Image (tube, rainbow, N blue to C red):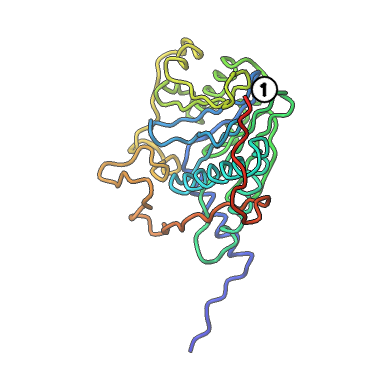
Amino acid sequence: MSAPFYVSPEQLMKDRADFARKGIARGRSVVALQYADGILFVSENQSQALHKVSEIYDRIAFAAVGRYNEFENLRIAGVRLADMRGYSYDRRDVTGRGLANAYAQTLGTIFSSGGEKPYEVELFVAEVADDPAEDQIYRLTYDGQLADEHGFAVMGGNVEAVAERIAAADVAGAPLDRALQAAVAALGHSDQGERVIPVEDLEVAVLDRTRPQKRKFSRLRPSRLQELLGERGPATSAPTESEAPATEDEADEGIGIAPGASTDPSRDDPHDPTDQVSGSVPGLVDPLAGGEPPVAPPDSDT
C-alpha cells in the first residue's frame, strides 16, 4: 500500500488562499464610502436582478464581491440572524459588529476546513449611526479576517487603482453628489484609460441617516443617478467577453453570462476543472441566544 501524498499545512493554506483570491479578482470592484449623511455603496453591475448590495436590518447593509451563490447564502444567513436577535431581545441589540463577528467565524471555519473549498467572496458589513463619527464599515475576507475601515473601502477587481483614485479625490464626508461622482469615476479608471460607465450599469445604494423611517437603506434609481452625476460625456460599456481579459470575467457573479451558459446563479461552472460544488452555509451562531427560542416580540417603539 502506497503512502498518502503529503502536503504541508503552510502550502495547503497558501493554495486555498490563492484559489479564493483568483475567484474574487474576476469580479468588478465595490466601493463603500462615508458621505455627509451616511454611507454610500457603488458598484458596476449589469444585472438588474442579482444584487451585490442589499439590506440586512434597520441600519445595516451588506455588500459583496465574488461568487454570487456563496455570498447570497451568507446574506440570507445574516438576515435570519438579525431577525432572530431583534425578535428575541430588542432591535437595538442587532449591530453591525455582531453580524461582522458572526460572518468572520463562519468564513474562517470554512477556509480552514479540509472538507470543502474556500469561499470566493469578500464582504462589507456597514452600519450607519446618528453621529457620523460612529458610522462603521467592516471588511471581511475569504479567510475570516475582519478589518474596521474608515472613510472608504474597496474590494474586488482592481482594488489598488480604484482606492488610489478615491483617496486622491478626498471626498470622505462630502455631499452625496460629489461622493458618487468620485466613486463612479474611480470605478471607470483603468490602465487602458478612462471609461464612462452607463447609468444603467451602476448599482448604487445608501444608508441615509436623515431618512425619517426606521429603515435607513435605500437604492438609487437610474433617474436619480443621472440627476446626481450630471453630464459626463458619452457612456462606454464594459468590454465584451471577447474583448475583456480573463481576469475581468464575471461569469461567477452571474453577470455577463456567456451565450449558451447556464443562467442559474446557484450552479457552479461545469467547464472549469478547478470548480467545485459549494457546500451549504451553516447558520450563523448568535452568541447571545444560547440556543433558546424567542421570548418576546420586537420593540414597537416609533
Mark 1 Cα shell of 10 Å, populated few (<14), some (14-19), many (≥20): some
**Where is residue 97, by image quadrant?**
top right
Image location (x, y in percent) of residue 134: 73, 29
Would you place residue 17 above or below residue 132 in this image?
below
Q: Nearer the viewer, residue 126 or 189?
A: 126
Residue shown at 59% from the left, 17% from the top = 176
Residue shown at 47% from the left, 44% from the top = 72
Would you place residue 11 above or below residue 269 in this image?
below
**Where is residue 248, by image quadrant?**
top left
**Where is residue 137, by image quadrant?**
top right
Residue shown at 67% from the left, 22% from the top = 172
Would you place residue 52 above or below residue 292 in this image?
above
- Residue farthest front in this picture: 296
Q: Nearer the viewer, residue 140 or 247?
A: 140
Q: Nearer the viewer, residue 114 or 39?
A: 39
Quadrant location, the C terminus: top right
| Residue at the disc numbered 1 | 172
- Residue farthest left in this picture: 260
Q: How many marks?
A: 1
Label 1 element class? loop
Side of 118 relative to 275 (left or right): right
Would you place residue 32 above or below residue 8 in this image?
above
- Residue farthest right in this picture: 133
Image location (x, y in percent) of residue 42: 52, 28
Q: Amino acid at mark 1?
A: Ala
Image location (x, y in percent) of residue 108: 61, 55
Image location (x, y in percent) of residue 138: 65, 39
